């Protein structure tokens, strides 16, 4: 059995449209239809039900879809492995990341692409951990970098890389920026901007405030971390975010919160049982190095560290 019909089958199973699948595969509808028909004849089963103009996977089709994905993945992995054995590190890594961890990913990407200039990266940013999990489960991402939610999909495994405390974030010109620490009870003395209530980081913040019975009514709520950081740069507002948000923003200062805060767990999410290419493993080595430095600074209480002062660790940016 050739690999091409399997690729055609997987694409058609994903979009359930001969028109859309043929466009994405750059082939004619008749070529795709003939390939699927020949595959069904070879297997002796119907992979799709045709009802009017719509198509649906049969039970046999759903079973065969998992096998087809694995077969294609094994071949791609094998080809990539042979190239890497010859020290030809090429290929594409599909990475997902939530917006609030972009500063960390940015450092890793810069280091990695300098070391492996022929490697290609596809990066998907999202506000939602659940969206990234769905992309992982459908094998559209090799892995994702996220703050680990309490509930992860049964198909997804989570590996914790580091812990990050929540801090009050303010522009260097804001009077809060020079404080040694900040009590949550003082939040209402300043204009506050928070992330949207639906975002995971905000849910952790709300849980922390409820624990100390502190009610805060933010003046502004946004669903974009980059937008929030830009607004902080006006020097008018303060916010609560993970400490690492200042990694690529030396003009923003992270002030430790006096009360005990819930830790944000920086985690790698990936599909259970998925074998990463050697190129992907090289990227994960860079990620482990960066998060290890974050963890070491946190454990040491490194308030004067480069990371805490909003500078990237390891000179990577």
Image (tube, rainbow, N blue to C red):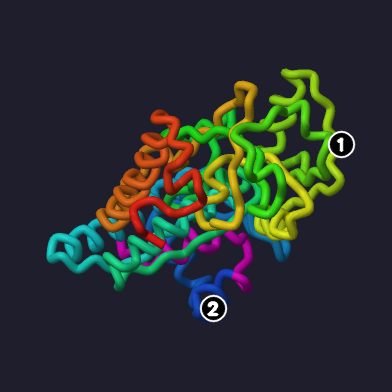
Residue in the foreground of this view, choosing between 40 and 252: 252
Query: Dividing the picture into quarters, in which one does residue 89 lie?
Result: bottom left
Residue in the foreground of this view, choosing between 277 and 206: 206
Image location of residue 257, percent across then percent down: 63, 30
Q: Is residue 305 above or below residue 102?
A: above
Residue 30 shows which numbered tag? Answer: 2
Describe the element under mark 2 as helix, strand or loop. Answer: helix
Q: Is residue 201 left or right of residue 43?
A: right
Which residue is under mark 1?
A: 217
Residue for point 30% across, 60% down: 76
User: Does residue 135 show up?
Assistant: no
Query: Dividing the picture into quarters, in which one does residue 18 lie?
Result: bottom right
Query: Magenta-highlighted stretch: main secondary structure?
Result: helix
User: Does residue 239 show up?
Assistant: yes
Whether 18 is among the magenta residues is yes
Residue for point 25% across, 62% down: 80
Residue in the foreground of this view, choosing between 247 and 177: 177
Image location of residue 57, percent across then percent down: 58, 51
- The first of marks 1 and 2 along the sequence is 2
Q: Is residue 228 left or right of residue 270?
A: right
Residue for point 59% across, 34% down: 180
Q: Give yes or no for contact between labels 1 and 2 (Cβ–Cβ under 8 Å).
A: no
Residue for point 66% across, 58% down: 226
> Which of the two discs, 1 and 2, sits closer to the camera?
1
Image location of residue 16, percent across then percent down: 62, 60
Q: Is residue 38 above or below residue 202?
A: below
Residue 118 shows which numbered tag? Answer: none
């Amino acid at each position: 059995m050739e690999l091409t019909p399997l690729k055609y089958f997987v694409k058609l199973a994903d979009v359930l449209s001969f028109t859309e699948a043929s466009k994405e595969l750059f082939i004619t509808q008749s070529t795709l239809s003939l390939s699927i028909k020949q595959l069904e004849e070879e297997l002796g089963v119907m992979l799709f039900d045709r009802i009017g103009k719509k198509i649906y996977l049969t039970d046999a089709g759903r079973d065969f879809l998992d096998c087809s994905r694995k077969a294609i993945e094994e071949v791609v992995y094998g080809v990539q492995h042979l190239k890497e054995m010859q020290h030809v590190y090429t290929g594409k890594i599909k990475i997902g990341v939530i917006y609030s961890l972009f500063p960390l990913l940015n450092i890793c990407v810069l280091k990695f692409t300098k070391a492996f200039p022929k490697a290609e990266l596809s990066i998907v940013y999202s506000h939602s951990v659940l969206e990234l999990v769905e992309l992982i489960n459908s094998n559209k991402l090799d892995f994702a970098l996220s703050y680990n939610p309490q509930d992860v999909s049964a198909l997804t495994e989570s590996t914790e890389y580091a812990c990050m405390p929540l801090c009050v974030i303010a522009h260097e010109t804001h009077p809060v920026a020079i404080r040694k620490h900040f009590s949550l009870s003082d939040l209402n003395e300043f204009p506050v901007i928070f992330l949207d209530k639906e975002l995971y980081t905000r849910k952790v913040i709300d849980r922390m405030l409820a624990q100390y019975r502190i009610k805060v009514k933010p003046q502004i709520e946004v669903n974009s971390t980059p937008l929030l950081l830009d607004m902080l740069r006006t020097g008018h507002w303060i916010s609560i975010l993970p400490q690492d948000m200042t990694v690529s923003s030396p003009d923003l200062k992270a002030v430790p919160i006096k009360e005990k805060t819930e830790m944000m767990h920086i985690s790698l999410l990936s599909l259970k049982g998925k074998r990463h290419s050697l190129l992907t493993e090289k990227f994960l080595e860079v990620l482990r190095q960066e998060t290890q430095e974050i963890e070491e600074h946190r454990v040491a209480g490194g308030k004067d560290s480069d990371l805490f002062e909003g500078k990237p660790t390891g000179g990577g940016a």
